[in-house]
Image: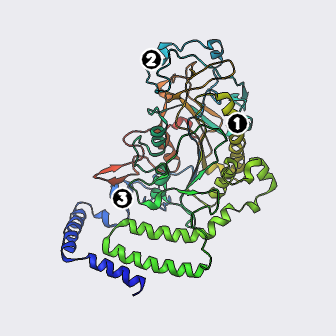
C-alpha cells in the first residue's frame, strides 16, 4: 500500500458514524448561525470577520497583502527593522545626560524622588540607595546640539537622522514580563508579537521570504544576559505561518533548508506536491486551519532554498559598504553582519526584521561591560542608517532601537568613582527611531535630574503608545487590526495606546 493510501485509510477510519455526526452537528450548526449573524465571515477575509469596521473608509489605492482589505491611511513606512537591545540598556550612560549627578555621587536617592516605587529583590535588601553618576563624558552633536555619550561616536555622527525619545515607560519591572510586554503588548505569554500582527494584517510583497524574520546576534564574552524564548516572536493565537522565522548563523540559515545527499530539487518538488495533496485531503476532512498554514509553510520552505542562499551571500556588497559596518561584518551572527543582513532583507521587501542583541544586564561592573558591548553595537547601527539613506530607503524604512527598560541612578552592590552597577528602571528609559516617517533631529520628552521620573505627563510614551505609533506609520489604525479568539476581539495594544504625533514628520 502506498504512503498516500495508508494516510487516507487512517483518515477514513477516523470518520466513524458517531464522530461524523458529532463534528457535523457542531460544524454545520455553527456555520449556519455565523452566516446569519455575520455574512462577512464567508467572504474569505478574516480581518473583516473580526472587525467589520475595517471595510469602511479604506482608500482603494492602498492595497494590503494580508487579511486587511486595505490600509487605513497612507503609510509613511513600508517595513520595520527593530534593533532590540535585550536586558535593558542604560539611558544614563548613553543618551540621558545628567551633569548635576556628579555632585550627588554616593549620596542617597531622596525618598521624594523614588516616591514609593517598587524595586526588584536584587536591591530591595540594600540598606541604602547610593547615587552612581555616569563616568562617561557627553558632547553635543548635530544641528540641535543633542547630547550623546562618548561611547557612541558613530551614532553621534548620524544624530540628525534620529528621533530620540527619553520618556518611554512600562509597568513591568523584571526582564521576561518586560520583554514579553514590549514584543506582544501583554506581560502574559501567549499573545502574537508585533511582527506576527504585521504579517497577518498586511502581509509581505516578497513571497520567497517570510514576512517576519528574526536575527540573533552573538553575545559578547562574559556578558550577563537573560534567556530569550521563541514565543517572543511567536504568532500566539494567529495562524502559525505568521510567526517569525529565526535565521541561524551556523550551518544552514534555516534547519533542513538544504536537500540531503541524493535528493535533487526535482525529487523534493515531487515529494512536496504529494505531501500537499495529502494535507489538502486532511484539510477537507478535518477543517483545521493549521493544516492550511502547514501547506503554506512547506511551500515557503521550498522557495527559501533559492532565496536564502542569495540573501546571505555578501559577494555583491562593495568594499566601502562592508567597511562602513565594521570588521565584524564578515562573521555571520555578529551584530554588524545582522545589520547588513537586515538591509538586504529590507531591499527584498521583508516587512519586519528584528535583530536581538543581548548583554545589557549590567547589575555590576557596568562601565567596563558597556564599553565592550558598544564596540559591537555603535558602528553597525550608524552604518545601517547611512546605508539605507544612501540607497533611498530610509524614508520608507522605520528603524527602531531600544530595550525593555533602563537603569536606576542608584547603584547595586559596591560603588566607587570608576565602577558601579544598576537595577531595572521601568519609569523612564530611552529609545530612538530613524526614517519611516519619524521627525529627524528630534529629542522628545525630558526626565528629572536623576533620570528617575518623567517631567511632563504630556510627553510620556507607554509601550502601547509605541506599538500604536509603529502601526500608524505603516498605514494601520491600531484599534482596527483585531483578531477574534476565545470569544473576544484582541489587538496588539489591548484597550489602550495613542499615536504620539509630536514625533512624526
Seen from the viewer's position, the closer of residues 225 and 390 is 225
In the rendered structure, which disc, 1 or 2, sits on the residue that comes first in sequence? 2
| Residue 162 in view (yes/no) | yes
In the rendered structure, which disc, 2 or 3, sits on the residue that comes first in sequence? 3
Please say if 416 is above or below 361. above
As drawn, the residue found furthest toward the bottom would be 1
* Disc 2: CA contacts within 10 A as few (<14), some (14-19) or many (>=20): few
Residue 41's x, y, as percent? 31, 63
Q: Nearer the viewer, mark 3 or mark 1?
A: 1
Q: For the residues marked 3 and 1, what is the alpha-carbon distance in whole angstroms?
A: 49 Å
Q: For the residues marked 2 and 3, what is the alpha-carbon distance in whole angstroms?
A: 46 Å
In the rendered structure, which disc, 3 or 1, sits on the residue that comes first in sequence? 3
| Residue 59 in view (yes/no) | no
Q: Which residue is mark 3?
A: 48
For the point 54% across and 40% down, the residue is: 226
Please say if 67 is above or below 11. above
Q: For the residues marked 1 and 2, what is the alpha-carbon distance in whole angstroms?
A: 34 Å
Q: Nearer the viewer, mark 2 or mark 3?
A: 2
Please say if 278 is above or below 227. below
* Disc 1: CA contacts within 10 A as few (<14), some (14-19) or many (>=20): some
Residue 7's x, y, as percent? 37, 79
* Disc 3: CA contacts within 10 A as few (<14), some (14-19) or many (>=20): many
* Residue 372 badge: 1
Tally of numbered discs: 3
* Residue 115 badge: 2
Residue 469's x, y, as percent? 50, 42
Amino acid at each position: 500500500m502506498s504512503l498516500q493510501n495508508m494516510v487516507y485509510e487512517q483518515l477514513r477510519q477516523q470518520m466513524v458514524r458517531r464522530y461524523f455526526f458529532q463534528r457535523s452537528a457542531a460544524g454545520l450548526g455553527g456555520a449556519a448561525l455565523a452566516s446569519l449573524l455575520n455574512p462577512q465571515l464567508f467572504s474569505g477575509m478574516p480581518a473583516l470577520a473580526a472587525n467589520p469596521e475595517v471595510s469602511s473608509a479604506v482608500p482603494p489605492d492602498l492595497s494590503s497583502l494580508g487579511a486587511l482589505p486595505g490600509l487605513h491611511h497612507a503609510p509613511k513606512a513600508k517595513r520595520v527593522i527593530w534593533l532590540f537591545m535585550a536586558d535593558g540598556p542604560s539611558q544614563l550612560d548613553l543618551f540621558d545626560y545628567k551633569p548635576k549627578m556628579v555632585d550627588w555621587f554616593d549620596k542617597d536617592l531622596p525618598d521624594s524622588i523614588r516616591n514609593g516605587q517598587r524595586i526588584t529583590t536584587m536591591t530591595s535588601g540594600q540598606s541604602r540607595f547610593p547615587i552612581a553618576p555616569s563616568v562617561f563624558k557627553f558632547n553635543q552633536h548635530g544641528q540641535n546640539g543633542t547630547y550623546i555619550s562618548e561611547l557612541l561616536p558613530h551614532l553621534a555622527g548620524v544624530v540628525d537622522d534620529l528621533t530620540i525619545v527619553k520618556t518611554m515607560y512600562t509597568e513591568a519591572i523584571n526582564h521576561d514580563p518586560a520583554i514579553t510586554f514590549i514584543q506582544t503588548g501583554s506581560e502574559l505569554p501567549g499573545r502574537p508579537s508585533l511582527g506576527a500582527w504585521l504579517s497577518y494584517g498586511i502581509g509581505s510583497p516578497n513571497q520567497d521570504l517570510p514576512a517576519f524574520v528574526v536575527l540573533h546576534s552573538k553575545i559578547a564574552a562574559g556578558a550577563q544576559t537573560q534567556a530569550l524564548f521563541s514565543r517572543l516572536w511567536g504568532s500566539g493565537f494567529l495562524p502559525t505561518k505568521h510567526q517569525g522565522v529565526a535565521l541561524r548563523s551556523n550551518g544552514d540559515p534555516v534547519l533542513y533548508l538544504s536537500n540531503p545527499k541524493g535528493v535533487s530539487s526535482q525529487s523534493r518538488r515531487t515529494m512536496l506536491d504529494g505531501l500537499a495533496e495529502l494535507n489538502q485531503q486532511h484539510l477537507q476532512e478535518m477543517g483545521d486551519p493549521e493544516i492550511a498554514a502547514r501547506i503554506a509553510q512547506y511551500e515557503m520552505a521550498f522557495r527559501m532554498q533559492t532565496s536564502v542562499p542569495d540573501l546571505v551571500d555578501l559577494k555583491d556588497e562593495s568594499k566601502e559598504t562592508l567597511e562602513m559596518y565594521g570588521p565584524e561584518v564578515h562573521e555571520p551572527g555578529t551584530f554588524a553582519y545582522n545589520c547588513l543582513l537586515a538591509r538586504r532583507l529590507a531591499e527584498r521587501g521583508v516587512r519586519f526584521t528584528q535583530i536581538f542583541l543581548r548583554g545589557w544586564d549590567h547589575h555590576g561592573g557596568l562601565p567596563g561591560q558597556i564599553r565592550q558591548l558598544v564596540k559591537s553595537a555603535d558602528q553597525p547601527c550608524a552604518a545601517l542608517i547611512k546605508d539605507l539613506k544612501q540607497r533611498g530607503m530610509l524614508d520608507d524604512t522605520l528603524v527602531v532601537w531600544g530595550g525593555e527598560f533602563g537603569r536606576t541612578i542608584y547603584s547595586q552592590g559596591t560603588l566607587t568613582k570608576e565602577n558601579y552597577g544598576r537595577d531595572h528602571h521601568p519609569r523612564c528609559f530611552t529609545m530612538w527611531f530613524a526614517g519611516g516617517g519619524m521627525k529627524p533631529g528630534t529629542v522628545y520628552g525630558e526626565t528629572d535630574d536623576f533620570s528617575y521620573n518623567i517631567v511632563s505627563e504630556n510627553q510620556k510614551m507607554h509601550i502601547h503608545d509605541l506599538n500604536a505609533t509603529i502601526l500608524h506609520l505603516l498605514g494601520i489604525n491600531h484599534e482596527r487590526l483585531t483578531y477574534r479568539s476565545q470569544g473576544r476581539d484582541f489587538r496588539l495594544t489591548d484597550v489602550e495606546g495613542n499615536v504620539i504625533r509630536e514625533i512624526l514628520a
